[in-house]
């Protein structure tokens, strides 16, 4: 068996030829490469002269093979343009699975997404140019799995003043989104002997699934108007949203914060703090990070997904010293390091003041959206009770009727909203009829239409 690289003109084919190396062998090898999808439609092939030279066969052998495949419709030959793979529909094999597309809505008010139309393109581009120009050569090589020191220093300063986090740049780890942060922490916890993770009874099932996939048994904590019931904590670790419970929208009460820290100290436990939208506070003073109460018992996690855009895939952890080395070992085997250029750009974006200005603009933008939503509901859906409005990017609506029926009717009209039950650890076991409505999306030009349709659904 011999592998060839046809690199003179056109694509590198990497054909494996066996047997007599005649026309039939070449035809079969090209057939297999096209049918498997390795040679995509439109791929330009080398000239017959180049391929014959690389294969060590006569040029006529290649020309005849090309001719046969052209006649069969697998290749297309154009005068002056060479030969390329034909554009044809690939047959669906038995092993292919057709997955249903996720639902799409004319207006999407499901929670969890910011208004990505506010992404500061000009400022980000300016920061990227400056960061790229100033970056040392070593920044483009393999580096510290914790991430670039420039970003870790910028985050240490920002988190200390904006969120009250006690952050040392040496204990900050940059990751590719919150999902990776939770995955790595769950993996390390299991390796360190943890088997049970307490979680709030309302949250994202994806997060619970991540912990389960790393071997942890996930158990729910009840949630009330004071936040998670920390008197129910069990196991060796807990995942909490203390600044703004997702999706109920309340902060963790001060006495429960203290209780959670005492539990972690008593049972040598770890609290994972998910500070997913810590920057967006409207009607009350910002709630400081739980991590400040005991940095050795709390792993703080934050993300750029809400403040900037989910597509950046940038998040960070501030971890206890005891977990730093095992976490970095897990990070090395996961992806070695997070993409450097975006880290450098975010570092410049923060230190230049662009990030603070952007957050202030977004805070005002979202507050206006929230106020508009609340005012409209008071007039057009007076039977609805609005809660959880002092922070974040969503509201909780207690509705006089069947919440799931409202969601279904909204979907038929092209509006995406969600029930509170959708975020319950045990769906279907609660009697509260409530909806979770996000106001981060859609963009401004569609927001009025989305609110109008929402009020129509709620008024029925």
Image: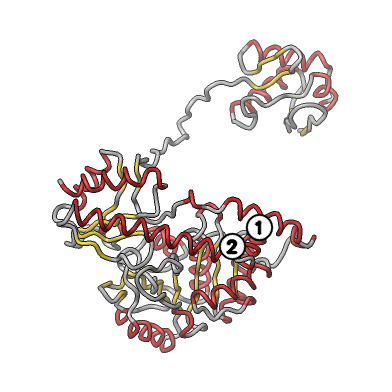
Q: Are marks 1 and 2 in contact (CB under 8 Å)?
A: yes
**Which color scheme does this rendered protein use?**
secondary structure
CA separation in Å, label 1 and label 2: 9 Å
Q: Secondary structure at mark 1?
A: helix
- The quadrant of the picture occupied by the N terminus is top right
Q: Is residue 129 left or right of residue 414?
A: right
Q: Establish if 438 lies above or below 165.
A: above
Q: List the residue tagged with mark 2.
A: 354
Q: Does residue 21 appear anywhere in the picture?
A: yes
Residue 265 picture quarter: bottom left
Dot 2 surroundings within 10 Å: few (below 14), some, or many (20 or more)? some
189 or 316, which lies in front? 316
Residue at screen point 40% across, 54% down: 440
Q: Which mark is residue 127?
A: 1
Q: Secondary structure at mark 2?
A: helix
Q: Establish if 406 lies above or below 194.
A: above
Percent position of residue 180, x then y: 52, 61
| Pointer 1 or 2: first along the chain | 1
Residue at screen point 22% across, 48% down: 455
């Amino acid at each position: 068996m011999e592998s060839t690289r046809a690199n003179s003109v056109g694509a590198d084919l990497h054909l494996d030829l066996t047997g007599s190396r005649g026309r039939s062998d070449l035809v079969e090898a090209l057939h297999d490469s096209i049918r498997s999808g390795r040679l995509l439609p439109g791929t330009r092939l080398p000239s017959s002269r180049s391929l014959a030279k690389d294969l060590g066969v006569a040029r006529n052998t290649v020309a005849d093979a090309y001719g046969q495949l052209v006649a069969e419709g697998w290749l297309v030959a154009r005068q002056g343009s060479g030969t390329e793979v034909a554009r044809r529909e690939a047959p669906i094999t038995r092993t292919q699975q057709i997955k249903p597309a996720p639902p799409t809505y004319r207006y999407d008010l499901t929670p969890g997404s910011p208004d990505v139309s506010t992404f500061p393109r000009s400022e980000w581009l300016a920061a990227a140019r400056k960061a790229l120009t100033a970056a040392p050569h070593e920044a483009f090589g393999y580096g510290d799995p914790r991430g670039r020191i420039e970003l870790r220093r910028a985050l240490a300063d920002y988190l200390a003043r904006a969120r009250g986090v006690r952050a040392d740049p040496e204990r900050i780890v940059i990751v590719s989104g919150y999902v990776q942060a939770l995955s790595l922490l769950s993996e390390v916890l299991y390796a360190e002997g943890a088997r049970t993770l307490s979680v709030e009874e309302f949250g994202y099932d994806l997060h619970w699934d991540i912990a389960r996939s790393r071997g942890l048994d996930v158990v729910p904590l009840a949630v009330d108007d004071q936040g998670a019931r920390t008197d129910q904590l069990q196991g060796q670790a807990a995942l909490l949203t203390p600044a703004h419970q997702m999706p109920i929208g309340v902060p963790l009460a001060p006495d429960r914060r203290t209780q959670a820290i005492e539990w972690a100290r008593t049972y040598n436990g770890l609290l994972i703090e998910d500070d997913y939208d810590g920057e967006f506070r409207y009607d009350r003073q910002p709630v400081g990070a739980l991590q400040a109460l005991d940095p050795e018992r709390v792993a703080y996690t934050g993300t750029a997904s809400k403040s900037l855009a989910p597509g950046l895939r940038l998040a960070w952890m501030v971890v206890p010293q005891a977990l730093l080395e095992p976490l970095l070992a897990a990070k090395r085997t996961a992806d070695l390091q997070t993409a450097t250029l975006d880290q450098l750009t975010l570092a410049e974006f923060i230190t230049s003041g662009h990030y603070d200005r952007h957050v202030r603009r977004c805070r005002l933008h979202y507050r206006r959206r929230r106020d508009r939503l609340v005012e409209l509901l008071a007039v057009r859906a007076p039977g609805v009770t609005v809660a959880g409005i002092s922070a974040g990017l969503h509201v909780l609506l207690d509705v006089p009727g069947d919440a799931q029926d409202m969601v279904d009717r909204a979907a038929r009209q092209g509006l995406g909203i969600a029930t509170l039950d959708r975020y319950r650890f045990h769906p279907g076991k609660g009697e509260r009829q409530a909806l979770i409505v996000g106001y981060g999306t859609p963009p401004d030009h569609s927001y009025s239409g989305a609110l109008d349709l929402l009020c129509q659904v709620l008024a029925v």
